[in-house]
């Protein structure tokens, strides 16, 4: 019985020792956790995007400008005929910046037919109010929408400003940020004044150069007959006979001699 008691004590001792050994052994390390971002640090900002190009102006602004011009002409009461012309014009033809010179109704009534080139000749592709027009010198030219034609400033004074000889009767009839409209007393004639850009002096060429005229001939010497229409020494060819340098014989004596000779011959027969 004593031996079984000792065996029980030994079993309890070994069990206690094994349990203590397992508890004292270190556990395997756990995998490292990724560091959590601190609340103070923020992610870097994204790169700035490239600026967008400005959008082109809307084409609907041109018809609105035409409507405003038509309202101004109707309000003036003296440009009703041009209201129909502007109404029938293509809005896309009018540039975004322009100056219009509108003739009065009585000037348009004097025209027998409507010229299709009349409207583009009265439009300058630049906004010019009256104070800016006065900065031009007389004989200056303004380009127009009619190719190769320009408007001539014939008088630049404030009281008598005129273009192509037509007085500026109602300056600044309509003014906006891009368009200026002025009333004129007559139709601007491109056939009379518009060709100034083509009147620049042209250099003379070998073929187009005009030959100088020959010098006048010297007076003929006395006693020498020179036929009319011939220029001596001028290089001109004449159909007249060459001049006669013979000695003149009296015609009367020649006739008398012939009569005497004929009488003698008749007597011999």
Image (tube, rainbow, N blue to C red):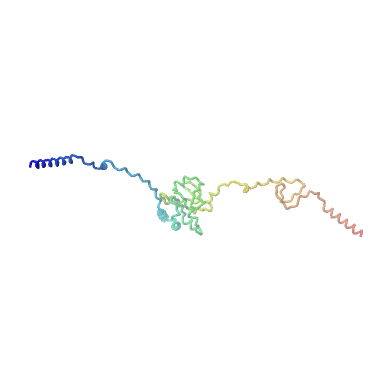
Q: Is residue 27 left or right of residue 85?
A: left
Q: Is residue 39 visible?
A: no
Extreme bottom residue here? 269
User: In this view of the protein, which residue sits in the foreground, 96 or 114?
Assistant: 96
Q: Is residue 205 left or right of residue 168?
A: right
Q: Is residue 247 left or right of residue 6?
A: right
Q: Quadrant of the N terminus?
A: top left
Q: Residue at x 90, y 58 (%)?
A: 265
Residue 114 on image: x %, y %: 49, 58
Q: Residue at x 30, y 43 (%)?
A: 43
Q: Is residue 141 left or right of residue 207?
A: left
Q: Quadrant of the C terminus?
A: bottom right
Q: Is residue 3 visible?
A: yes
User: In this view of the protein, which residue sits in the foreground, 6 or 191?
Assistant: 6
Residue 194 on image: x %, y %: 52, 51
Marks counted in the figure total: 0
Extreme right residue here? 268
Residue 17 on image: x %, y %: 15, 40
């Amino acid at each position: 019985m004593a031996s079984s008691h000792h065996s029980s004590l030994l079993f309890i001792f070994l069990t206690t020792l094994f349990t203590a050994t397992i508890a004292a052994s270190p556990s395997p390390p756990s995998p490292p956790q990724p560091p959590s971002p601190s609340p103070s640090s923020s992610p870097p900002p994204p790169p700035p995007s490239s600026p967008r190009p400005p959008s082109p102006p809307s084409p609907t602004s041109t018809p609105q400008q035409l409507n405003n011009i038509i309202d101004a002409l109707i309000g003036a009461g003296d440009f009703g005929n041009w209201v129909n012309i502007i109404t029938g014009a293509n809005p896309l033809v009018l540039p975004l910046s322009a100056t219009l010179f509108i003739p009065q109704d009585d000037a348009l009534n004097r025209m027998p037919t409507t010229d299709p080139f009349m409207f583009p000749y009265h439009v300058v592709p630049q906004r010019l109010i009256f104070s800016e027009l006065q900065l031009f010198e007389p004989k200056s030219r303004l380009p127009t929408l009619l190719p190769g034609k320009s408007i001539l400033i014939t008088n630049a004074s404030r009281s008598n400003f005129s273009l192509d000889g037509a007085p500026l009767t109602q300056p600044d009839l309509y003014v906006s940020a891009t368009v200026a409209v002025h009333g004129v007393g007559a139709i601007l004639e491109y056939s009379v004044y518009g060709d100034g850009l083509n009147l620049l002096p042209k250099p003379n060429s070998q073929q187009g150069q005009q030959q100088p005229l020959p010098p006048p001939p010297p007076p003929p010497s006395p006693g020498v007959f020179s036929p009319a229409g011939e220029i001596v020494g001028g290089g001109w060819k004449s159909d007249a006979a060459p001049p006669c340098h013979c000695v003149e014989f009296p015609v009367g004596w020649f006739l008398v001699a012939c009569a005497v000779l004929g009488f003698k011959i008749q007597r011999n027969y």
